[in-house]
């Protein structure tokens, strides 16, 4: 499996604090069958600026060495939405930093309570630049959970959608689970990722979520959400969309 949303770099956000914790967290994911982890530290959120890609890459290099490549850690980030996302990308200060596996898929986190009014126009501009926004855990966003059409409009602008494994397993409450089901019924879900932070607080649960999806949503959905679509992002190839088209990752 490939985990597209994982906080595994120590000491730079609310993920692990130490190298030992980072190694244990990644090895727990490997024990579940995860072969590749996209390291996605928070960028431009609260006190976590993390706008130095060279510093991030040094952490990834060391973590890969400690793990011996099992699982493999590749570069990414979780970008906190801002109205100047397009300007940052065009300047180059955001592109290489937050793109998943240095491709053109950009993992974007919204505030938990709302969707900023500029989101649709920013997503449209990003799509013109060939950038595919990947919306992180919309089922945990109050606005989108209550109004799935808000998410559908962003997908229509070219976005892809990542659901958190724990939401499917009931770890974020009934509303997050119900929203995940509603999004899937509208063909708005493209990936399931762990959003792992620590073994104690938010461990990787992809294997359990995979079993849940296979039982609830079927084998075809399981293959798409855990294998085919995440692999397309890591390999920088188009991700198949529900309308029969594709989105470049």
Image (spheres, rainbow, N blue to C red):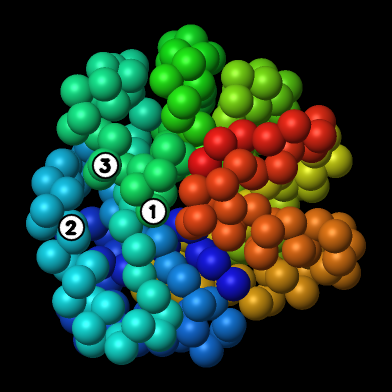
Q: Residue tagged by mark 2?
A: 56
Residue 111 appears left or right of 175: left
CA gap, disc 3 and disc 1 = 9 Å
**Which mark is first along the chain, 1 or 3?**
3
Can residue 176 be spotted in the picture? no
Quadrant location of the N terminus in the rendered image: bottom right
> Picture coordinates of residue 189 (x, y %)?
70, 44
CA gap, disc 3 and disc 2 = 11 Å
Can residue 6 be spotted in the picture? yes
Residue 44 appears left or right of 36: left
Along the line of sight, the residue nearer the viewer: 71 or 176: 71
Q: Which residue is drawn at 81% across and 57% down?
A: 221
**Which mark is first along the chain, 2 or 3?**
2
> Picture coordinates of residue 90 (x, y %)?
26, 21
Q: Residue tagged by mark 3?
A: 96
Badge 3 vs badge 2, beta-carbon distance below 8 Å: no
Check disc 1: other Cα within 10 Å, few if <14, some if 14-19, many if 20+: many
Residue 14 appears left or right of 127: left
Q: What element carries label 2?
A: helix
Q: Quadrant of residue 125?
A: top left
CA gap, disc 1 and disc 2 = 13 Å
Q: In this view, does 124 lie above or below 228?
A: above
Q: Residue 101 carries which label?
A: 1
Along the line of sight, the residue nearer the viewer: 210 or 171: 210
> Picture coordinates of residue 198 (x, y %)?
37, 73
Q: In which quarter of the image is residue 155?
A: top right
Q: Residue at x 18, y 32 (%)?
A: 93
**Which mark is first along the chain, 2 or 1?**
2
**In this view, the mark in front (1 or 2):** 1
Q: In this view, does 127 lie above or below 209?
A: above
Residue 14 appears left or right of 184: left
> Picture coordinates of residue 115 (x, y %)?
50, 23
């Amino acid at each position: 499996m490939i985990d597209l949303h994982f906080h595994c770099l120590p000491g730079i956000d609310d993920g692990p604090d130490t190298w030992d914790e980072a190694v244990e967290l990644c090895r727990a994911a490997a024990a579940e069958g995860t072969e590749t982890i996209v390291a996605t530290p928070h960028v431009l959120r609260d006190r976590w600026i993390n706008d130095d890609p060279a510093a991030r890459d040094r952490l990834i290099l060391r973590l890969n060495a400690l793990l011996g490549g099992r699982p493999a850690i590749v570069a990414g980030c979780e970008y906190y939405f801002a109205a100047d996302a397009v300007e940052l990308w065009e300047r180059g200060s955001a592109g290489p930093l937050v793109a998943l596996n240095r491709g053109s898929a950009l993992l974007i986190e919204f505030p938990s309570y709302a969707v900023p009014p500029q989101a649709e126009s920013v997503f449209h501009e990003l799509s013109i630049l060939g950038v595919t926004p990947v919306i992180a855990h919309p089922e945990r966003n109050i606005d989108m959970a209550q109004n799935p059409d808000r998410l559908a409009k962003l997908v229509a602008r070219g976005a892809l959608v990542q659901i958190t494994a724990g939401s499917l397993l009931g770890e974020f409450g009934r509303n997050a689970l119900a929203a995940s089901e509603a999004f899937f019924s509208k063909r708005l879900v493209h990936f399931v990722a762990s959003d792992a932070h620590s073994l104690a607080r938010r461990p990787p649960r992809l294997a359990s979520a995979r079993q849940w999806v296979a039982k609830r949503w079927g084998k075809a959905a399981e293959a798409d959400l855990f294998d085919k679509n995440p692999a397309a992002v890591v390999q920088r190839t188009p991700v198949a969309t529900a309308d029969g088209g594709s989105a470049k990752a």
